[in-house]
Image: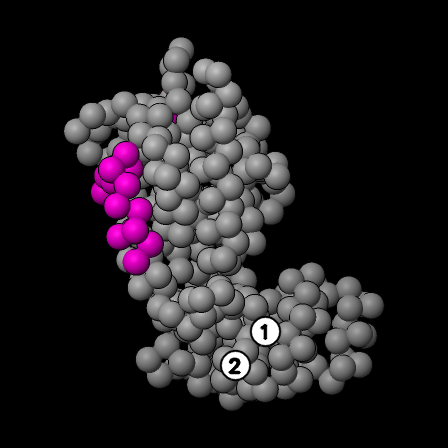
Amino acid sequence: MDKSFEVIIVGGSYAGLSAALALGRSMRKTLVIDAGHPCNSPTPYSHNFLTQDGVPPTEISSVAKSQVEQYDTVHFYNDFAIEGNKTTEDYTIQTQDGSIFSAQKLIFATGLKDIMPEIEGFAQCWGKSVVHCPYCHGYEVRYKKTGILANGEKANHYATLISNWTKDLTIFTNGPSTLTEDQTKRITNHQIPIIQTPVKNIGHVDGQVQNILLEDDSEHTIDVIYSGPDFVQHSNIPEQFGCEINEHGLLVVDGFQMTNIPGIYACGDNSTMRSVALAVASGTKAGVVANKELIEEVF
């Protein structure tokens, strides 16, 4: 396999495949490096994506890859990218098996890695009945008895937002509340209980939440939980190149998916709100802009 390309895309999920499609249709010699571990793999169905609403994520990505594979300038390599370097003329990416590939442009579609809290049952329910986004999951769990597992500003944000889908809300702060006095007053005025007792575990059946058990052994029947666990960048290679990370832990990009490092782009969950539709859109933009830059550099 040739090791030299015009563009290397690190990450072959929705954003990466979308970028690859744009580049394939631009006849760019492109390599997609991917190990096949998308961050939304626990989620059984994708929603809020026009023409694909309710379709399993694996089905969307499978169809997408089969379409991208029709373009003979796009190549795939199944491995983890572990290191990046800048040479005089281009960029290099090394994979876990020791292979080194080079390209003039890099697109990182590497996603995020969620850090599951140490609460028994949380990870087993994640993406199924413990969810993070009402735009992705809210309609399916509308009007249900809903818990918010969060504290401080995140709890306040969830309480405000999710009240659009259900009024049957309870906040579990999992320890002393860090909500401000004004936030607490506004939440309680909407008859939303705030429970500060630490959470012992989440009772579930095959990933479907049944209840929340607290450290004082009190039990609360709950059908679904909203929670936004901490996360880190799935790949540290952009940081190796000096790409800027904002206060939210996301790669900083401009309106054209460009990072602060010339020739390096980012798209998908690593740099924007989590959404399959937004990942696809940002991937298309990254591929189009990378091709445009390659044209302008020789014209």
Mark sitting on residue 45 = none
Quick one: 43 or 19, which is closer to the camera?
19
Image-based side of 111 in relation to 60, left or right: right
Q: Which residues are magenta?
A: 63-85
Residue furthest to the left: 1
Quick one: 241 or 186, which is closer to the camera?
241
Q: Residue at x 47, y 44 (%)?
A: 284
| Vertical position of residue 98 compared to residue 273: above or below | above
Q: Earlier in the sequence, mark 2 or mark 1?
A: 2
Q: How is the image coloured?
A: one colour
Q: Residue at x 75, y 76 (%)?
A: 187
Q: Residue at x 81, y 74 (%)?
A: 185
- Cα distance between the residues tagged 2 and 1: 13 Å
SS class of the residue under badge 1? strand
Q: Is residue 34 magenta?
A: no
Give the number of marks.
Answer: 2
- Quadrant showing the N terminus: top left
Image-based side of 167 in relation to 56, left or right: right
- Residue 209: x and y, percent? 44, 81
Residue furthest to the top: 88
Asked whether residue 122 appears in the rendered view, the answer is: no
> The disc labelled 1 sits on which kind of residue?
Ile
Q: Quadrant of residue 245?
A: top right
| Vertical position of residue 284 compared to residue 102: above or below | below
Where does label 1 land, which residue? Answer: 148
Where does label 2 land, which residue? Answer: 141
- Residue 149: x and y, percent? 56, 71
SS class of the residue under badge 2? helix
Asked whether residue 56 appears in the rendered view, the answer is: yes
Q: Mark 2: give few (<14), some (14-19) or many (20+) Cα within 10 Å.
A: some
